[in-house]
Image: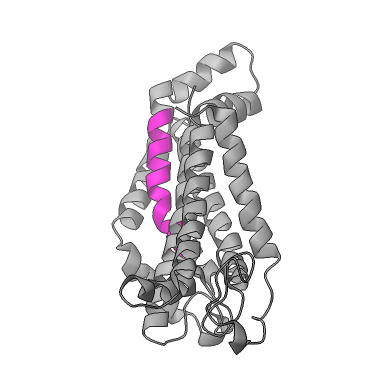
Amino acid sequence: MIPRKLALGIGLACLVVLMGLGLLAPAHLSVPDLARVYEGPGDMFPFGSDQRGRPLLEYAQQGASVILFPSLFAGVVVGAMGVVGGLLRCVGSARVDTAVQAFGEIVGSLPRMVVILVVALLIPAGDRGLLPLALAWAILASPGAMDEAASVAERLGGARFVEALRAHGFSWSRVFLYHIVLLNLRPVVVRQAAETAMQVTFLEIALSYLAAQENQSSFTHADDIKSWANLLEIGYPSLVLDVPTSHALVLGLALVGLVTVMSLMLSSAARAR
């Protein structure tokens, strides 16, 4: 198994690359240059060009800007809900446990994609973006994180664990924030947050790809912004037709792989000792 420090370094490096792409994204694509259509990475550094001679780097940057904040926000929401679920199990209240269980059963029973599509349709066309969909996805994913964190707290002993540490003179902040959250809930919280961020990325790509295939406006970004799904759309024909677009497909898959590796490495770095 990969060492924690190495996993943390790789995960943070992937995050830095993602943030760098997103923060440096141009507001609009470059002016088309038909003399440089479908150039490869060797001719137009670093990723080549599209069917109108525009750099694919700008596609990567704009796609990163679309998913960067919403995916991180969704991950933070799920992580926070996981912490809440674990801490509430340590309260030792039957009413609280019942309320948390009811919330989990109601929200967890909802079909995620149906809810996401309903939320997308309710958003006015001029205000469409990934953030509302990411928040909806995070809320739907929260019951799983809360339940897993509560199970970890239950194995610790729940309220009895808190009482034992308090009897040894530890403060409330040290008991809850250090012993419970940092030492015991950390693996669950970080993994759930990282997986949610990855899922939101996949959700954006899926919705944008479907919109591009149907020549419709995307639910996740403005029409003048490109998604990573557009890279896959450009590159996919190279698998079945003799068109020089394989470099776009490779770039799109590499960016998806970047997010996947980031999620896996951060989860591995936070695993229990």
Q: Nearer the viewer, residue 257 or 116?
A: 257
The quadrant holding residue 12 is top right
Which x, y percent locates residue 8?
Answer: 59, 36
Which x, y percent locates residue 129?
Answer: 54, 74
Residue range of the region highlighted in magenta in the rendering: 136-152
Is residue 29 toward the left or the right of residue 86 in the image?
A: right
Which image quarter is the N terminus in? Answer: top left
* Count of numbered labels shown in the rendering: 0
What secondary structure is the stretch in magenta mostly built from? helix
Q: Does 149 lie within the magenta span?
A: yes
Which x, y percent locates residue 19?
Answer: 65, 57
| Residue sitting at x 57%, y 42% | 11
Which x, y percent locates residue 107?
Answer: 35, 57
Tell me, yes or no, if residue 16 can be seen here.
yes
Q: Nearer the viewer, residue 249 or 85?
A: 249
| Residue sitting at x 55%, y 29% | 4
| Residue sitting at x 43%, y 61% | 202
Q: Does 45 lie within the magenta span?
A: no
Q: Nearer the viewer, residue 78 or 150?
A: 78
The quadrant holding residue 152 is top left
How is this picture coloured?
A: one colour
| Residue sitting at x 57%, y 71% | 48
Q: Nearer the viewer, residue 24 or 239?
A: 239
| In the image, residue 262 above or below residue 51 | above
Tell me, yes or no, if residue 208 can be seen here.
no
Is residue 102 toward the left or the right of residue 217 in the image?
A: left
